Image (tube, rainbow, N blue to C red):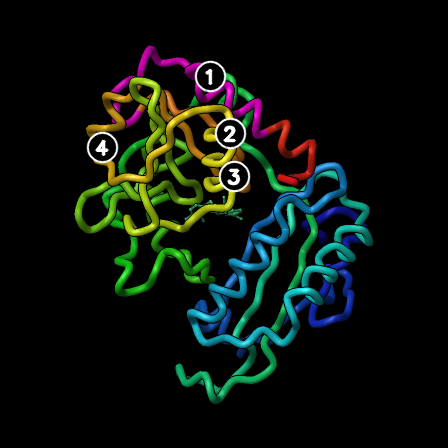
Amino acid sequence: MGRLHENARIWINGRLYDEEHATVSVLDHGLLYGDGVFEGIRVYGGRVFLLEEHIRRLYESAKAIRLQIPYSPDALTAAVRETVQINRLQDGYVRLVVTRGAGSLGLDIRKTSDPQVIIIAATITLYPAEYYEKGLQLVTASTVRNLSSALSPRIKSLNYLNNILAKIEATDAGCVEALMLNHKGEVAECTGDNIFVVRDSVIRTPPPEAGILEGITRNAVIRLAREAGHTVLETPLTRHDIYIADECFLTGTAAEVVPVIRLDGRTIGDGRPGPVTRQLLQRFHELTRRGGFE
Ligand code: PXG
């Protein structure tokens, strides 16, 4: 039984497979140890959105974990575009995965070979449209974000348990997202999104040093906000800064730009998506229609 669209073709190391035959070894260290990296990328109007940025981050993540991707960035870029075309994807989502490859049991990367480079072109379910109009509620997770010095959150690795544990807390609390703090108690990010607040017309978001994934949507929204004349500061934030903010929103490839109206039972602003959030949401949609920056 297929989970993707009919006749989905999945690219693995230069070959295309049906979903049924798109498999990796049970000895792949991606499975055995979460040893690998990935990217989640959007497709709008048949064009792969901010692909260059995603490819760059993928190679940076791979470098950080000493994983040699067996293709050049240009070759992989072409492969992503080709897979999107073959699947006739207009608006969708690309999952690009690089595993360490199969090896004997044990952590030693020298005993592995053949990293598996996988490109899945599919769709992703958004939050219900209602959240974009009315905003969503967050709870603070008790699960602290990975310590940067232990496993840098800047690496988009196949090791997502830290975020999954926080996401379980969100679900248990009846929320779709949870706020994660770093070991200092500062605001880091949500389980799959970066976070922004607006207060007295100034936009603030935690810096990469707060222990976050430096989101590509985050960086695009910072640029859009500055182009619209807003002041954007990358600065440490506490939960209190969110409680007393005029506005709050999240950014991410899957989430795009989504307003937040409550955190831990505290209503943010007047409990409705604010004007800056709505403006940036609109500008972000324009950017997706343009296919990216110049
Ligand atoms: N923080 C974390 C921890 C993330 O995983 C973001 C921020 C936003 O980054 P981008 O570059 O997307 O703006 C992410 C992104 C998935 C999925 O399949 C997860 C993400 C993106 C797309 C799909 O769960 N996480």
In front: mark 4 or mark 3? Answer: 3
Residue at 45% in and 83% down: 109
The answer to the question of whether label 4 and label 1 lie on touching residues, with beta carbons closer than 8 A, is: no
Per the model, the C-alpha gap separating discs 1 and 3 is 23 Å
Secondary structure state at the residue bearing disc 3: helix
Direction top: furthest residue: 270
Q: Which residue is mark 3?
A: 220
In front: mark 4 or mark 1? Answer: 4
Upstream in the sequence, badge 4 or badge 3? 3
Per the model, the C-alpha gap separating discs 4 and 1 is 21 Å
**Closer to the camera in the image, 97 or 8:** 97
Q: Which residue is mark 2?
A: 227
Residue at 28% in and 59% down: 148
9 shown above or below 291: below
Q: Is ligand 1 within 8 Å of the beta carbon of the residue shown at mark 3?
A: yes
Q: Amino acid at mark 1?
A: Lys
116 shown above or below 187: below
**How many residues crowd around disc 3 within 10 Å: few (fewer than 14), some, or many (20 or more)?**
some
Magenta segment: 263-284
**Closer to the camera in the image, 138 or 201:** 201
Q: Which residue is mark 1?
A: 134
Q: Which residue is mark 4?
A: 239
Secondary structure state at the residue bearing disc 1: helix
Asked if the magenta segment contains residue 272, the reply would be yes
**How many residues crowd around disc 2 within 10 Å: few (fewer than 14), some, or many (20 or more)?**
few
Asked if the magenta segment contains residue 180, the reply would be no
Q: Is ligand 1 within 8 Å of the beta carbon of the residue shown at mark 4?
A: no
149 shown above or below 125: below
Q: Amino acid at mark 2?
A: Glu
